[in-house]
Image (spheres, coloured by chain):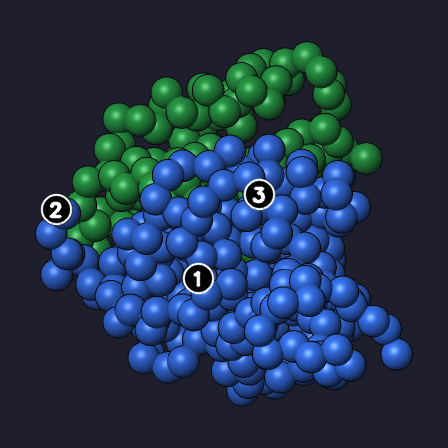
Chain colours: A blue, B green
Amino acid sequence: MDQIYIPKNRMGFNIGSHVIIKLLEQEKPIEKPYFYNVSSIEPVKLKLIDDIFKIINNITSYDNIIITGSFIDLGFNFEDIDILIISEKGLDTTNIEKKIESSLKIKNHIINFNKKTFDEALSTDPLWRLMLSKCISKHRLKPIPKKRINYKILDLHLLKSKPLIDNFDYLNGKEKYKLIRNLIAIKLFLTAKKVTNKEINKEINNIFGINVEKIKNNLLDKNLFIKKYKNVYNWTFNEIMKYTKNEPKQK
Amino acid sequence: MSQNRNKLIILFIGNIANAIVHKILEKAINNKEITDKYRKETINSFDKAKEYREKINPKNTRLPDKDVQNVKSKVVNKVKAELKLRISKGYEGIDLSLVEELVDKYLKETSVI
């Protein structure tokens, strides 16, 4: 048993009394982030996320930090970590990326939004809704804003899926999947369905009759696939163009 | 070999045209903050076009005159067709006068002209 010494006239402490000795300052435990549709994640990734939060905390102030993308899927089949930083001031994202990479030896991609632009992106862009459908954030997220159809933004995003038709023979499976996913996300957004990875993969299976893994492994039958893809692309384009009649007024 | 070169030129034309259409539509949106956000989920048509260009001889100098004429007119036609399709459906704010200028700019950047 340890002994402690205090002045002998200290009231209430008789010689031989039993006391508890406790540190005034304790090491802070890992702060628990907020999980959205992440049922399970490896402890090593959680530690990395906590380290990322600390690094960003030391560099800048922010409203929220959101980790998303393939990094939070189970396993280690990711290329980098997607990090959204919501802050009112513009950030030098390249500098933060470099600091995180040099400290944690892991590639990362930072996107900086202010609150207004982030809300705008979430209400008009299906892929941002998809990103937020599964994520981990430093602070609690606000409810996702109501969707708003902006035909110009959707058309711009849809155009990114067009190269699949001409470049089919020259793209690998993962590239093809990303282009298909982009198209289907827009289609789901237009038809008022939830834009999540699960819904997208289900829709891909329904339309093309193909398992997503088959696409990622580049095992598509070109003739069968391209015909259906063109139909879905044209249908989606025509649906978007229907909204040219009621364009939202620019503020 | 010649057939392969022709195929590469067709792919180059398709991708560079897509990149130019994208640029003109971005200008029509007039919301830089939204359109500037980098979306690495999708393939960048301009990068793809550069990949194909690197496989077309001559790589580092301008293409022969007959190729230049062919490529330029096909890119201009493709871009205009895409934009006019949108205008016919009621899309507002597309500036067709940007086409020639951007085609020249992109073809110079890829050492076609």
Q: Residue at x 72, y 34 (%)?
A: B5
Number of numbered markers: 3
Identify the residue position indicated by label 1 in the image: A128
Label 3 crowding class (10 Å Cα cut-off): few <14, some 14-19, many 20+?
few
Identify the residue position indicated by label 3 in the image: A58
**Circle on res. A59:** none
| Residue B11: percent from left, percent from top | 61, 42
Identify the residue position indicated by label 2 in the image: A251
**Alpha-carbon span between mark 1 and mark 3:** 27 Å
Name the chain letter of the residue that bears numbered label 1. Answer: A
Q: Are marks 1 and 2 on the same chain?
A: yes
- Counting residues from the N terminus, which is met first, the one under dot 1 or under dot 2? 1
Callout in the foreground (1, 3): 3
| Residue A195: percent from left, percent from top | 44, 75
Tell me the amino acid under the disc marked 2: Lys
| Residue B79: percent from left, percent from top | 39, 38
* Residue B103 horizontal side relative to residue A48, left or right: left
- Counting residues from the N terminus, which is met first, the one under dot 3 or under dot 2? 3
Depth check, front residue: A239 or A202: A202
| Residue A227: percent from left, percent from top | 54, 70
Label 1 crowding class (10 Å Cα cut-off): few <14, some 14-19, many 20+?
some
Q: Are marks 3 and 2 on the same chain?
A: yes
Tell me the amino acid under the disc marked 1: Trp
